[in-house]
Amino acid sequence: MKFRNFKMVDYVVYGRGAFNQLDEIITPHRKNGKPMVFLVDHFFDRKPLVSRVPAKGNDTIIFADVTYEPKTTYVDKLAQQLKDEFGSVSGVIGIGGGSTMDLAKAVSLIMNNPGSSADYQGWDLVKNPGVYKVGIPTLSGTGAEVSRTTVLTGPTKKLGMNSDFTPFDQIVLDPELTTNAPANQRFYTGMDCYIHCIESLEGTYLNEFSKSYGEKALQLCQKVFVQKDTWDDECDDMLMMASYAGGMSIAYSQVGVAHAVSYGLSYLLGTKHGIGNCIVMNHLEEYYPAGVKEFKYMVEKNKIEIPAGICKGLSDEDFEKMINVSMGMKPLWENALGKDWEKIMTREKLRTLFEKL
Ligand code: NAD
Ligand code: ZN
């Protein structure tokens, strides 16, 4: 048995208003004449948060277009733009949801690694550390703030740049930044965390390390989405820690059926991660009975619409594509169903599941 020895985020600051410490935190990382790059979720364009970004000198603020989940072409374009304008930079600071944080990680890596980000989609392909990188979530749930991956859609696959160089050097967890996120978005991204917990806790890869974090994260999600009747600051505080702990849990285990199937949807239909997981989770009673029951309760209680019928009218070829992508996620299936997963989740069975979505 060989145990995973994983790299974690170096520095973490948590608290309401922690964003105000950003200037002080990044100052020691400024290199002579080289700018800090603030990659800010386009949602904040012309919003008050922008005036609080501690940009000075030749620092630059770029609004990240996250209409679509991050693509390798977009990462390459951003990195090239920075190389052309500045040669190199002091650091990249990603402020936004999972998409913006992933973009920031990927751009940081491509600043110091030759070629395209598509060349590094996989496990441990990145050769050099990236430039200094900071992650500042404005939505809670993905765990992208703690993970060793950055999920990218490339020319041939949707796969992360998984490496020891991928985790942030610093994260700033300020729950104030998630205030006022739309209820639906907050729910979809929050459910990403809930589903991470269920998949981790019900998985065969579980050990005490991931269980400890997974149970805590699950409890926080339940407080927020089951026990609370109205959204308040405490919900934002708790969900931000749930996301962190949920991310820590899957770092040492793995996700499962909902993610494996959701990746198929996302590849073919461009369905976004959070909502795609919800669409799938709605139909997974067979695999996660208690989790799905509670999930449905939370959907109802929080008055959320989960889209249905998104696979209606797809061709056999389309289904084949989704099945191929989904079946390719071997570790996810193995975690969910054990070593003999291929005997349990056949292509026919998966097709039937996709047809229900
Ligand atoms: P997102 O980053 O895609 O953002 C969703 C929407 O919310 C966008 O329109 C964005 O502009 C908006 N938004 C962001 N913050 C807001 C705020 N405070 N108020 C209002 N709107 C706001 O959503 P997400 O669910 O956080 O992230 C999903 C992405 O994360 C996917 O690309 C997925 O692949 C990735 N992901 C990565 C990991 C990882 O480990 N690296 C894990 C899970 C998911
Ligand atoms: Zn997820």
Image: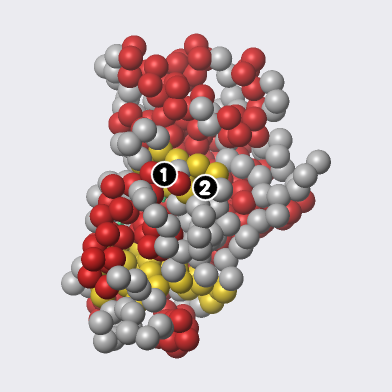
**In-front residue for pair 353/305:** 353
Residue 349 against residue 234 in the figure, above or below: above
**In-front residue for pair 29/347:** 29
Residue 51 against residue 86 in the figure, above or below: below
Residue to which mark 2 is pinned:
125
Looking at the image, residue 32 sits to the left or right of residue 48; the answer is: right
Residue 84 against residue 35 in the figure, above or below: above
Badge 2: residue crowd in 10 Å (few <14, some 14–19, many ≥20): some
Badge 1: residue crowd in 10 Å (few <14, some 14–19, many ≥20): some
As helix, strand or loop, the secondary structure at mark 2 comes to loop
Q: How many marks?
A: 2
Determine which of the numbered discs, if any, sits on residue 10 in the image: none
- Which residue occupies the extreme right position in the image? 1
Looking at the image, residue 100 sits to the left or right of residue 85; the answer is: right
Answer with the quadrant where ligand 1 appears in the image.
bottom left
Quadrant for the C terminus in the image: top left
Cα–Cα gap, marks 2 and 1: 8 Å
Q: Are marks 2 and 1 in contact (CB under 8 Å)?
A: yes
Q: Is residue 119 visible?
A: yes
The coloring applied to the image is secondary structure
Quadrant for the N terminus in the image: top right
- The residue positioned 64% from the left and 15% from the top of the image is 343
Residue to which mark 1 is pinned:
119
